[in-house]
Amino acid sequence: MGTSRARAKKIKNLKFFMPRAENSNPKTEFNNMKEYFLNESSERLFKTRVDFKKSLNEEQYKVVTDADGPCLVLAGAGSGKTRTLCYRLAYLLEKGINPENILLMTFTNKAANEMRERVESLLEYKPKGLWSGTFHHIGNRVLRQFAEEAGLKNDFGILDENDSRDIIKTSIEKYKTRLKDDKFPKPAIIQSIISFSANTDTPIEKNLESKFIYFLKFAEDIKKIAREYTDKKKLSNNVDYDDLLIKWKLLLEKSENARDYFSNKFQYIMIDEYQDTNYIQAEIIALLAARHRNILAVGDDAQSIYSFRGARVENILTFAERFRGARIFKLETNYRSTPEILELANNSLINNKNQYKKKLKAVLSPLTLPALVKAGNTYSQAGFICQRIKELQKEGMTLRDIAVLFRAHYQSAELEMELVKRGIPYVVRGGIRFFEQAHIKDILAFLKILANPMDEISWLRALGMCEGIGPKSANKIFEFFQSSGLNLETFIKKDLHGVLTPKMNQGYTRFLKIMRPLIANKENKVEAMIKDIMESGYKTYMLATYENAQDRIEDINELINFSHDYASLSDFLSDMTLKEGFRGEVLLSRGDTWESDYLVLSTIHQAKGLEWNVVITIGLVEGQFPNPKVSTTEKDIEEERRLFYVAVTRAKKYLYLLYPMERYDYQKGVIASEMSRFLEELDSDKYEIWELSYKNQHEYRNERFIDL
């Protein structure tokens, strides 16, 4: 043991013997034996190398030193949640708790690694034997140790998403009766349905009703495929990611041996982001904590925004009911944002009924009120953002200090085009730029064929979407067109049954179903052409192919709206080509100094856990935020309000909330937008109003006019 960390152990009358020399006489050796008695240590002097009192605020210190028994820590945004968890872990280790008796569970391996590194830095040594990692990582360790009792072999394999999808694809082969229906879900969709049902412990029919209503007629087929998928995993000695949790939970429920072992072993359990746990994860935690009941759940009900992934806000809201005698700690001191930003955030959250009451308090000095910016439409919204960014840069702000957040990706379309035109580099966090998304490029491929029939790339892309046509088949069809000498309109009418195989011809028929209306109505406006593509089969293709098909349909609807003002298909495609040619991701990868500074665009969900000096939240209108497709109940509205709260609390210094007063809808024309209820319900003294105008900048009452 190192002298800096010597620990006295309770040992009574321990005898130390000198080792016996080789070939020695036992009787002679006995005469040389020495006895040395250690007195029993009555108590251990608890002296740590870390000055916890000095390193933490009062709220954090109380958690770190007093969170024994079942405890819930409500860690507000920017309150030092990770710091508190790390110091709590360090405190337990310094207190003498064996690392092997501590379990730390996180939602990402990155988070677990960072916490371990911070604790090692604090203690100046590496605690060996600590159980830490994601739920799936820990589940794998547990199942390896008790494989037989879990109904597995010791050498079981773990399927990644692609492996799982391949097995589901082969499972579908047994139930071909519906496969000729082009509305039947693709393997990836069935995989998602099975996974969501497993993690939420709900029947497949119920999830189809709530998330995939258009597949409800295939419920029996999907259940058969799910059973076949389970059988195939068992036969091949494999589990998927969901099984790592499901089988772990079943092991703890059914095996007294395993349950006793782990509930005895883990004297202290710590869980990060508890508000994001699903049904199965909450059950596992409860089973593990049954013996020692030293469970520290850290989270924030105000940031529970992932119900679409199966997270249950009820897990954190009912913590005290589940763990009797639980104590609740609150971390309300915020080190991130100005008082004005926190006042607005607190003011918004009071409208939620189902929550723990808390009020964030700022450490930073007052600066300026958040701005509610009234833009004429989405184009003036984009213009304001670009102009304001340029102004902020002149004031010394870098692009990396600024983020534009939105509820759904389609809301960024006009902004992305304006950023390109003004030469402002940007990246889309956790995703792909709006005009570079697969479904947008699919639509453009059909339009490009119409505009330039010799565009080989667009032919190959459009044909490749049709089942039965692979790359070679698509190339064969294009070469046949190229060598035919026919124009597009004539070629499309040509019968290719004698050239294509039956399988290829089936896919080509779907291609023709989209192209023929386009050619027949080629004089139409661009927005009408895109609608034709959707109605002629592409919408059906999206629903059967993508788990987030409804989000993608919203994107296409926005593309239709965006195309409204273009006089010709040529002009529209020229702008799209300009857009596709400006790839911030590629520029940034080169490492040039100019390109190292870029604006961040992100959905609010992707922005959780991050922070910027300047946050601009766009599209704050009814019908967009809250999102109408998920806001059918009061519970849904409360989650949408929490999402607004997450957006607001990403800002450190400046917050801009943008409300476009008009917008174009291809079904209704130009409509007056209604301000989002999340803005309407704020007290008017929590923000200042900025109205956009082409006048010189001047102030009038509490309104600021911006010269665009």
Image (tube, grey):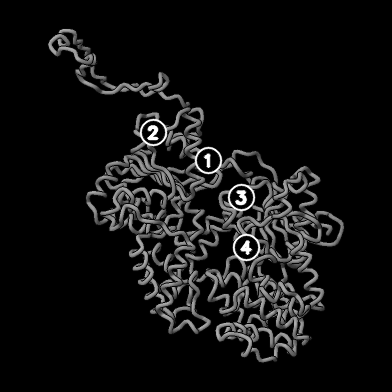
x, y percentage for residue 313?
44, 58
Q: Is residue 99 above or below residue 552?
A: above
Density class for disc 3 (Cα within 10 Å; few <14, some 14-19, many ≥20) is many
Distance from label 3 to label 4 (Cα)?
A: 21 Å
- Can you name the residue that lies furthest to the left here? 27
Front residue of 469 and 452: 469
Q: Which numbered dot is residue 680?
A: 4
Amino acid beneath label 1: Gly
- Can you name the residue that lies furthest to the right here? 696
In the picture of the structure, the residue carrying the numbered disc 2 is 92
Distance from label 4 to label 2 (Cα)?
A: 47 Å
Secondary structure type for disc 1: loop
In the picture of the structure, the residue carrying the numbered disc 3 is 650
- Is residue 691 in view? no
- Can you name the residue that lies furthest to the front here? 23
Q: Earlier in the sequence, mark 1 or mark 4?
A: 1
Q: Earlier in the sequence, mark 3 or mark 1?
A: 1
Choose mark 1 or mark 2, whichever is in front.
Answer: 2
In the picture of the structure, the residue carrying the numbered disc 1 is 80
Distance from label 1 to label 4 (Cα)?
A: 31 Å
Amino acid beneath label 4: Glu
Residue at screen point 75% across, 79% down: 526
